[in-house]
Image (tube, grey):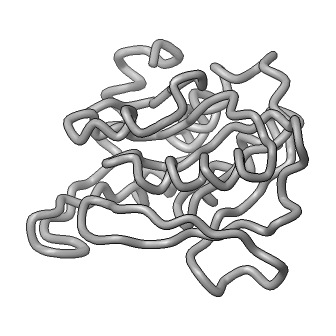
Amino acid sequence: MDSITKDEHAFLLSCIRDIPDYPKKGIIFKDITPLLQNPEALKITTEALTRPYRGKEIDLVVGLESRGFLFGPSVAQNLGAGFIPVRKPNKLPFHKIAASYELEYGADTVEMHSDAVKKGQRVLIHDDLIATGGTAAAATELVQKLGGEIVGYSFLINLSFLNGKDKLDKNGLFEAVITL
């Protein structure tokens, strides 16, 4: 992403710690809590996630459980858009639609309220990290099922070696602050 300088990139990388074998053996978890604790890192990240989508007429930002809830509402606010949570099963109280997907260490399902997106609304899908792309692809399926238009995808971290971007709507913009 060209929306941050090399120094900012290095700084943000220094605020992300690797946790080996979490949540299971062989996975290296990218822990962003040090980044969240640092006001300057928080500011740089929020602006970098927002900048590529200014002027794109985004109606809704869809944040993926759970770390997509950390920056998603701020990005939505910066864009003058609403925020829609996509959650794991049985976490939303109203009528829901669901989509299942594979991820790097198993399978899962996500849900969205059935009235969350109106036909023709322009949607940005956001999460903190894209790995295999399963969660974002499932969210895409939900948005499109309700008639929404995918404008783009926004991630703090892209684990590019897992090729998650390949599962996403090719018509949408794809932006990641940090690509590993």
**Which percent across, then down, holds residue 45?**
54, 36
From the viewer's perspective, tell me whether residue 88 is left or right of residue 164: right
Q: Vertically, is 90 above or below 128?
A: below
From the viewer's perspective, tell me whether residue 62 is left or right of residue 81: left
**Which percent across, then down, holds residue 105?**
24, 67
**Which percent across, then down, holds residue 109?**
50, 72
Image quadrant where residue 116 sits: bottom right
From the viewer's perspective, tell me whether residue 52 is left or right of residue 116: left
Q: Vertically, is 34 above or below 13?
A: below
**Which percent across, then down, holds residue 70?**
61, 57
Q: Residue at x 71, y 66 (%)?
A: 112
Q: Residue at x 69, y 28 (%)?
A: 151
Quadrant in which the C terminus appears: top left
Q: Residue at x 60, y 46 (%)?
A: 140
Q: 14 or 161: nearer the eye?
A: 161
Q: Vertically, is 14 above or below 44?
A: below
Q: 28 or 139: nearer the eye?
A: 139
Q: Residue at x 32, y 61 (%)?
A: 103
